Amino acid sequence: MTTLDKRDTDAATAGGHGRETFDSLNPATGEVVATFDVMTAAQVQAVVDAARPAARWWAELGPDGRKQRLLAWRTSLAKHLRELAELMHTENGKPTDDALFEIAVAIEHLDWAARHAGRILGRHRTLPGVLAANHSTSVSYQPYGVVGVIGPWNYPVHTPMGSISYALAAGNAVVFKPSEYTTAVGQWLVRSLSTVVPEYPVFSLATGLADTGTALCRSGVDKLAFTGSTGTGKKVMATCAETLTPVVIECGGKDALVVLDDADVDAAADAAVWGAMSNAGQTCVGIERAYVTPGAYDRFVSEVTRRASGLRAGDDRLADMGPITMPGQVDVIRRHVQEALDRGATAVVGGIESVRAPFVDPIVLTDVPADAAAEQDETFGPTLTVNKVADEDEAVRRANATAYGLGAAVYSAGRGRAVADRLRAGMVSINSVITFAAVPSVPFGGIGASGFGRIHGPDGLREFAWSRAVTRRRFAGPINLQTFERKPKAFQNLVTLVQTVWGRGV
Ligand code: NAD
């Protein structure tokens, strides 16, 4: 028996074969939700091999056939919304209402991806330019084949579905390795698609821990979409580099909220508390830091304090937030809070005693040093740091002063767009928080330590397809330089053309 964190793995003997398993636990009670195989590299390979003919069949169905199937899946998910939300509550710990909201967003993305893939990935004509004016030119997008998706536990439906829906809509089969903390939810999703696409395993499951993820990276999948921590993202990228397997890397964040004097401060405080504390702060695009200008600061702190003080973590139906899903994260939260307090920060809500595993109650810290871990590293708990800044410039400077670059938010009546344009973040919400994650038409992803590549929107569909450019000669052009039979006159004509078109001053 091996123990990895709280995921118990068991060397069980099934039918005489040594078979390793792991338990997925209810994070609030420690009860076993389900037991799964720790798949070996050979087992993962078998799943990927079985997905190959499925991928060919799925690609041949064409955009309309896939759209029909994916919309049927959407309908099925909508019908079974409550059942899935209950499972998420049990296995991940989040309140059922939060789970319902999460599934609703995932359903809208699936609907959008299914409806738009044909148009966005179909053949588009392009302009051939001057030198190839006698050609018609176009670009179209082809599915990769089998896409591996490795997911985290914090949004066990919305986050992996951001890759799965778009990869399937683009014509790929998907092999999904869910987090070991939320494998039952992953299995539920896979079974759910198989009820509307029974012919081939276009969406299949690989269960296990880190080594199973590594095996998926090495299995010959045609692309790998990873969502998880920055540390694991680096390992995934290194493993995929062995076979030049392309990757999308969606990692952690340290999202900032900027609040300016002209903001609706009550609304900003309300959004800050929800952005920081919902899902017990275990949100990659959760608000972890706020920078507030002097005219808004006092009211913002008092409103945040009032609202956050009323929240409670627990596993009962009335709790505002659930437990910390991954036990090891509690130590990270405690360390960040303790270091900030030791270095002179003030806890205006909660304190170190709020960390009572597996629950953490809201903690709001003010005057946190810029180089403290609570300002620089992902805390991933229901914590918020609030700092007063002199002006908009300082707010932007501090917001941008981390290695991460995932999401951000700004509250201002008149300067929202101007600030958004200066923030080093892949996504920004003005006068709300985290909205971009729910909007299917815009891309989702970060820069820097938050990773690269995009899911959602047209960019998210193209991420799961490779482009093929085609040129077609329509008639003989006036100047043909692509022959050894070209004449000196052709170059005189070329010089005249270049100087006429591009040689005049601007
Ligand atoms: P994690 O990195 O621990 O694990 C993510 C997945 O990777 C799991 O399925 C895990 O089994 C697998 N894995 C672990 N080691 C591996 C290896 N060496 N090779 C291949 N796979 C491996 O992350 P987590 O704790 O599950 O998730 C929380 C993190 O995810 C946070 O940092 C959060 O910010 C981030 N996240 C990012 C986004 C985003 O879209 N950018 C969304 C949600 C969560």
Image (cartoon, helix red, strand yellow):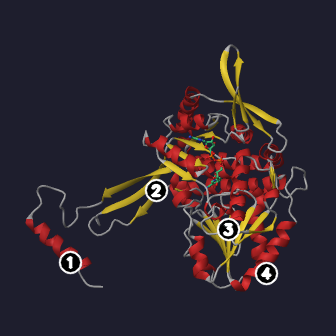
> Is tag 4's residue or tag 2's residue first in the polypeptide sequence?
2
Q: Quadrant of residue 206?
A: top right
- Disc 4 residue: CB within 8 Å of ligand 1: no
Asked if disc 4 and disc 1 are in contact, CB closer than 8 Å, the reply is no
Outermost residue, left side: 488
Q: Pointer 2: what residue?
A: 123
- Give the amino acid at mark 3: Arg
> Is tag 3's residue or tag 4's residue first in the polypeptide sequence?
3
- Give the amino acid at mark 4: Arg
Query: Quadrant where the C terminus lies?
Result: bottom left
Q: Which label number is shown at residue 41?
A: none
Asked if disc 4 and disc 2 are in contact, CB closer than 8 Å, the reply is no
Residue at the spot x=66%, y=45% of the render? 69
Residue 398 against residue 329 in the figure, above or below: below
Q: Pointer 3: what residue?
A: 289
Between the residue at mark 4 and the residue at mark 1, the CA separation in whole angstroms equals 63 Å
Residue 465 against residue 480 in the figure, above or below: above
> Is tag 1's residue or tag 2's residue first in the polypeptide sequence?
2
As helix, strand or loop, the secondary structure at mark 1 comes to helix
Camera-nearest residue between 145 and 205: 205
Mark 2, Cα crowd under 10 Å, few <14 / some 14-19 / many 20+, is some
